[in-house]
Image: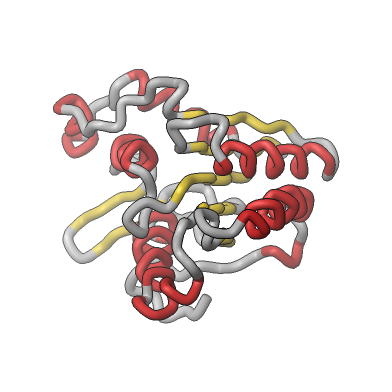
Amino acid sequence: MHILTLFAHPNRDSLTGAILDRFVAGLGASGQRTVEIADLYREGFDCRFQPEDYAQFQGAPMPDAIRDEQARVDRADALAFIFPVWWWSFPAVLKGWIDRVFSEGWAYSFQPGVSRGLLRDRPVQLIGVAGSRESTYRKYGYGEAMRAQIDSGILGYCGLRDVAVELYYDVEQSPENRARYLDAAEALGRRFLAPDRTRRVPTLGSERVA
């Protein structure tokens, strides 16, 4: 099994970076797996949607750099996204990666009134590192908003429906949480592809219940 892990934090020595390391350690301890880390900041990925990216809407080839990123996804048997939660969503570099890489004709097809996800369904794990308390997310519905936007609106729309999400809350104010989350990330890596971790995510407009 080959797992592509997208990492989006400007500081590799951050808590989010440590969670990445522990998650990958868990993956390695769980059997014959290979892991590729796409460290978007250190790789210098340009997250700005470019004029040449509009080629997708005319059926023309995408830029070579984007086709290389798409090939990374195509090679993967599973995907993971590890990121800090900023403004209740992805950091800009990760959102821009999706804007550019999840292109029409490769990730999805669209005609008026008809859309179809084109990505091969496979397990996806999201790990978001959040500064706010879980009670804040519940009070304002931030978690539900993220699920609608990311799980269904992006991943499910493109055909990725086996999505599991972990949000690690209150990391700014609680050292105890930090230590606990590091252990949790490693345990999550060990059980990432276990049969009981599957969660099916409905695409927008679907009447299926996750």
The quadrant the N terminus occupies is: top right
At x 59% / y 59%, what residue is drawn? 174
- The one of 130 and 65 positioned closer to us in this rendering: 130
Residue 122 horizontal/vertical position (percent): 59, 51
- The one of 43 and 77 positioned closer to us in this rendering: 43
* Colour setup of the view: secondary structure
Residue 99 horizontal/vertical position (percent): 29, 41
- On screen, residue 30 above or below 202: above
- On screen, residue 17 above or below 145: above
At x 58% / y 53%, what residue is drawn? 125
Residue 34 horizontal/vertical position (percent): 72, 32
Quick check: 172 left or right of 55?
right
- On screen, residue 160 above or below 142: above
The total of numbered circles placed on residues is 0
- The one of 78 and 84 positioned closer to us in this rendering: 84
At x 33% / y 73%, what residue is drawn? 205
**Residue 165 picture quarter:** bottom right
Regarding residue 162, the answer to whether it shows in the image is no
